Image (spheres, rainbow, N blue to C red):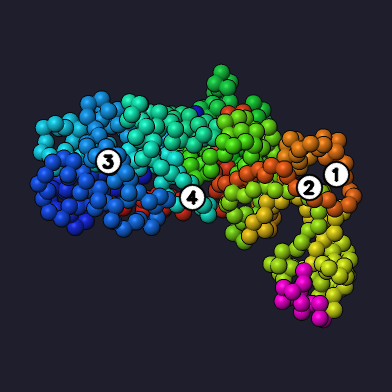
Amino acid sequence: MPMKTEIYRSRPSVLRGGNALLRRCCALAALLLAAQCAWAGSVPDRIRSLASEYAQASRTAASPYDERVWLERFYGARDYAPAWTGTDAAQAYSLLSKAEEHGLAAQDYDPRALAVRMRAHGTVAADEAADQDAALTLALLRYLADLHAGRVRSDFAAARVVDPVKLLQQGLADRNLAASVEAAEPRLAVYQRLKAALAEYRKLAALPSAAVPAIPSPRAIEAGAAYAGAPELAARLALLGDLAPEAVAPGSTYSAELAQAVKRFQERHGLDPDGKLGRQTVAALNVPLSARVRQIELSMERLRWLPDLSGGPFIAVNLPSFRLWAFKAAGAAPVLATRVIVGKAVRTQTPLFIGTLRYIEFNPYWNVPPSILRGEILPAVLKDPNYLVKHDMEVAGSGAQTVDAATLAALRAGKMRVRQRPGPKNALGGIKFGLPNTMNIYLHSTPARALFARSRRDFSHGCIRVEDTVTLANFVLGDQAGWTPEVVATAMAPGPNRTVQLKASMPVVIFYATAIIDVDGRPLFPDDVYRLDGALERSLAARSARSL
């Protein structure tokens, strides 16, 4: 489906402190660092010098990878002979020129400046031939690295390991650089679906403004109400795939058919699917299609940050979508898709991280986090001495449900803690999915089931509440001997506390994407609930604007 995007600002092709010769070279050659004087020697000698100087340069702090030794490794293996002649050079340029198909910016790899040098290959002086060869190599290495691990440092603690040198060497050896590009891409099925959606949305964004007129904003209206903007609304919904094209017909009524299409649109954009045409819905309809393209590009960047996940089953949670998926394999469709509740925006938002699910606790105790204990529980206890009794809580260790002055002081100092007993009042419900981490974040059920019906579900203190914990438990324990669905159901029923260690741990990925493709292939554009897209925009702009 969808549109054309604004491209990232290109890097200036300016070499700071370099000599006139390198200033005339293509932008990516300039990135190799200026030679301090004119170089008289063979092409291999020149390439050796450039690679050596580049290896001694300072690392760019914002980069997700250290590229300084790449040229030495690549050219050292071929005794510093130039790499790009004939069809290999043409193939390389062709790949770089298609960077935007992957949600990248062609300017970041300067294919047009490189093309000028390619056309002159074989007739230029030895120095310039070396410069253009090294420039094209560096552009391709960056391209492969950016596809594999992203262009800027991720929000995750551990960056993805990337070695584009091996990929490029293999592509050259096989005379198939396209295979190297394919190998560098994330293997997640959702990434490939987003790439397809990017192409469609670019087409939509390229439409003339007359083909995508603004939707008039009425007071909130329901099906059957008069609405002069019905033709424009119908055309927009058909364009976006929420209304069948044959259903589009002129009229001045907000029909039941239009209301159903609006519901579908609302579901895809994180709005209450009530079918009413109000201010929020019209605002979402009028978001420029170029902005939707950008959401897809930013989401593809974030998906590049994720681990390979090709080793078996895993769980993924997209915070803006308030959704959890369970997968048997990275390239497969999810076997479970369920709603979740995540940390409240600004105050207690859920962090992005990659955890490892190691155990399940049935009828869990809730060990109250220190921040909640100090900020909520202790003030409540001071107002109501019976607070712990009413909420089935106790002082851990002693089991006491009343607090004297000495205990209160110990609790405030962090020397003692409070926990909530298993049972119907327990904040974790009947099951906890444990993934040990320093942030004390885990997945769990909840007795507050009504909140899952909300379209926006950021209500927690940071942990993730899961709606369908029964199916999730069966997914996690499915390959563990003896854990049939009946046994799982019995363990989840009110009863004694029980912890089950998993025989095989499972990755849990907590990520953030404001564009995603659902199991039915529909593009979803949830709200940027934590306002993280702006920060990523700024990081990418800084990356594109830097000179190397």
- Residue 140 in view, yes or no: yes
Region of the chain picked out in magenta, as a range? 405-417
Q: Residues within 10 Å of mark 1 (few under 14, many from 20)?
A: some
Q: Are marks 1 and 2 in contact (CB under 8 Å)?
A: yes
Question: On screen, 276 above or below 380?
Answer: above
Of mark 3 and mark 1, the one earlier in the sequence is: 3
Q: Are marks 3 and 1 in contact (CB under 8 Å)?
A: no
The question of residue 409 being in magenta is answered with: yes
What count of labels does the image hold? Answer: 4
Q: Which residue is mark 3?
A: 75
Q: Is residue 251 left or right of residue 14?
A: right
Question: On screen, 309 above or below 171?
Answer: below
Q: Are marks 4 and 3 in contact (CB under 8 Å)?
A: no
Residue type highlighted by circle 1: Ala
Look at 65% across and 29% down and name the residue there: 260
Q: Give the CA separation, mark 2 to mark 4.
A: 31 Å
The question of residue 120 being in magenta is answered with: no
Observer-nearest residue: 315 or 168? 168
Helix, strand or loop at label 1? It is: helix
Q: Give the CA separation, mark 3 to mark 1.
A: 61 Å
